Amino acid sequence: MKSFLIKNAKLVNGGVITEADVLITGEKIAAIDKNISEIPSNTRVIDASGKYLLPGLIDDQVHFREPGLTHKADIASESRAAIAGGITSFIEMPNTNPTTTTQKLLEEKFALAEEKAYANYSFMFGGTNDNLEELLQTDPKNVAGIKLFLGSSTGNMLVDNEKVLEKIFSSTKLLIAVHCEDEATIKRNMLKYTQEYGEDIPVKLHPVIRSEEACYLSSSRAIALAKKTGARLHVFHLSTAKETGLFTNEIPLEEKQITAEVCIHHLWFDDRDYETKGTLIKWNPAVKTAKDKAGIWEALLDDRIDIIATDHAPHTLEEKSQVYTKAPSGGPLVQHALLALLEFYRQGKISLEKIVEKMCHNPAVIFKIDRRGYIKENYYADLVLVDLNKSTKVEKDNILYKCKWSPFEGTTFHSAITHTFVNGNLVFDQGKFEDLPKGKRLVFNR
C-alpha cells in the first residue's frame, strides 16, 4: 500500500489555518499531527513548507458533455483539467445527448465515468414534464440529486408545467437543484431585440434579454413552491443582487432547506467585460452589472450564498464565435476557478478559510457527501497543495480543456496549484499527470 507524507503544510480546514504534517495511507488520511516521525516504508515525503494544503474542491455544477457532445468536451479531458485546478470531485448535469432522464441512461453515464474520470464523480438526474415515475426511482445514496431547468438552456430540458413541478417538489426528498430564469420574460425580450437587430444582437444586451426580472421571477417562484411543499431546494448560479434577498443566513447550514450557489464568472466578470470578451462570456444566467456583482459578493461573504461552483460548460471556439443568436451560452472554468479565487484572496476580498468553506466544506454538507470536503483522519485523501508565491499564466498551450480556450486566456494569476491528490493518489504533480483515472463514484449519507 503506497503512502505519502506531506510535511510542514499550512492546513486550511474547519475555519482555521494550522501548520501540520499529513500522512496518507492507501485511499485515506491516516494521521494529522504537528510532527509525524513514524513513517511507513515506501513513503514519498513532500516538503510543503510555505505552501497551503486545502481539501480537494467539490464542484457541484459542471457540464462535461458526454455522451453525445464529445466534440467539445468529455469526461476524461475535463476531469483532467479539473484536477489540475484542484477540483477533486464533480457533480455533472443531465443535459447531454441523450439527456439523463431515465435510470438506464443515468447508469450508463456512471459506467462511462468509472472508466474515464480522473476526479470523483456523481450526476444529477434530469427532471422533465413527463418522467416523474423514473425520477422517483433515483437512489438517494448513490445519486447527487434532481436537476430541473426552469428556464431553457443547452439541451431542451425546460420544465414549464406548473402541476408537474408541484408534483416533483411534493414527491421527492432528494435535493432538487434548479436553473431559474423565467421563459416568458426572456422570449418577450428576445422578440423585441430580434425585431430591432435581427440575428446579430449586440452581446451587451444579453443581460437585458435574460434580465434581472427573469431571474427573480423564477427564483422567487421556486422558493415559494419549496416552502409550500417542504422540498429540499438548491438554487444554482445566482446572478443578481435582488435574488440574494430571497435567502437567509440566520440558521445553520445543516438546517437550511433552501440553499444557493454562485459561480466564478458572476464573481469575476460584469457587463463592462462584454466589450472585450464578447460571446466568450455569454452564460445563462447572464453576467450582469457591477452592482449585481457587488451584491452577490456581499451575500457570499455573509453566508446567504452557500457554495461557489463553476457551471463549467465548454463549447468550441467556432461555436462561440457565431453571432449572438447562434452562439451558445457557457464557458470552460474548472482549471482556473481556484486560481481566480486565490486572486481575490490576494486582493483581500475573501479569506482562504472562506474559500475552503464555500468550495469544499459546504458542498460536502449540503449534498451529504461521505467523507470528503475536509482534511480529517479516515477521510478520503482528496487534497490540493497551492503555492501563493508562484504565478500561473493562462496561455493557449497550457489550457487543458478539449475546446482549447478559456475566458481567462492571457491572465496571469499570482498563485499555482502544485499537487492534487484523489483518493490517496498523487494524480497531478507540478504539471505532470498520473495517466490513469483515479476517480470514484461519490456516496451520500442519506
Image (cartoon, helix red, strand yellow):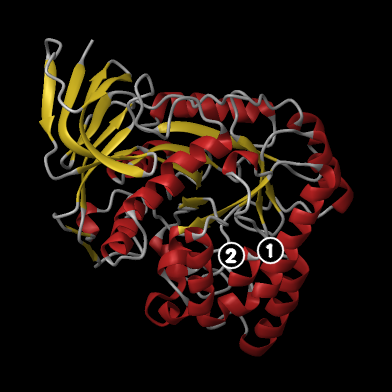
> Total of numbered circles in the picture?
2
Q: Residue furthest bottom?
A: 196
What residue type is disc 2 on? Pro
Q: Is residue 63 above or below residue 35?
A: below
Which residue bears the numbered disc 1? 181
- Name the residue located 24 percent from the left edge and 60 percent from the top edge: 394
Q: Give the image location of residue 378, x and y in percent.
A: 37, 19
Q: Is residue 321 visible?
A: no
Quadrant of the frame with the C terminus: top right
Q: Which residue is situated farthest in the right direction here?
A: 163
Q: CA distance from mark 2 to mark 1?
A: 7 Å
Q: Which residue is mark 2?
A: 285
Which quadrant: the N terminus? top left
Residue 281 appears in view: yes
Horizontal placement of 372 versus 327: left or right?
Answer: left
Is 119 displayed left or right of 109 in the figure?
left
Q: Quadrant of residue 98?
A: top right
Q: Which mark is residue 227?
A: none
At a point 29% along the width and 23% down the height, the residue shown is: 424
User: Mark 2 or mark 1: which comes first in sequence?
Assistant: 1
Give 380 or 155, whichever is nearer the viewer. Answer: 380
Q: Are marks 2 and 1 in contact (CB under 8 Å)?
A: yes
Image coordinates of residue 245 in percent, x first then y, are 65, 65
Amino acid carrying mark 1 in the image: Glu
x 33%, y 43%: residue: 16
x and y percentages locating residue 122 in the rendered image:
52, 32
- Residue at disc 2, secondary structure: loop
